[in-house]
Amino acid sequence: MAHVELSLSEVFAPDGRTSTEREFDSLGRWSEIVAEAAEPCLLIDADTRVVAVSASGCELLCLGAPEDVIGLPLLDGGLRLLDFTANRGELTEQETDKIPPLLALHSGRLARGLLRVQAAAEGAPDATVDAITTPVLHHGSVAGSLTFFSEV
């Protein structure tokens, strides 16, 4: 019969921080990485507010500068999503709830899908992007979502 011995070298003691401060740790660490990333990526919190976005992510999604959208709700920060019909109409609220960054928040699972982003400049072509999103967990609950984009 196998013998297993367990010993603890340190005692875990709570650090006295509030749950909001501890929640920020997960998003805070990821926000530093996203802000400096060369890849187009976006981090939102559970309230859908933009926590961080890379410069290349802003460019691909036609959002302007990162500092212009930090703290704003994702869909109020200038992101204009279009459907894939010939008419290129804006997505309805039901359709926007299914985009990968929001779907990962609601489901707590990985999400992937294509997005059509309206160009910021008049006459410029719209961008089609592949979005892959993972929920960001903190103590077992969803604190936000992290999305990576690739132009199609």
Image: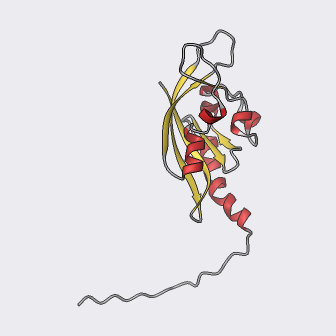
Residue under the image location 67 percent in, 54 percent down: 28
Residue 37 sits above or below residue 4 on the image? above
Residue 119 placement, left or right of 86: right
Query: x%, y% of residue 20?
Result: 73, 62
- Residue 87's image quarter? top right
Q: Nearer the viewer, residue 4 or 118?
A: 118
Question: In the depicted view, which residue is nearer to us: 30 or 47?
Answer: 47
Residue drawn at 66 percent across, 51 percent down? 46
Q: Residue furthest left?
A: 1
Residue 91 figure quarter: top right
For residue 108, side relative to residue 51 (left or right): left
Q: Position of residue 63 (x, y in %)?
A: 69, 28
Q: Is 18 located above or below residue 104 in the figure?
A: below
Between 58 and 134, the residue placed more toward the observer is 134
The N terminus lies in quadrant: bottom left
Question: At x 73% / y 63%, what residue is drawn?
Answer: 21
Counting from the top left corner in percent of width and height, residue 13 is at 64, 81
Q: How is the model colour-coded?
A: secondary structure
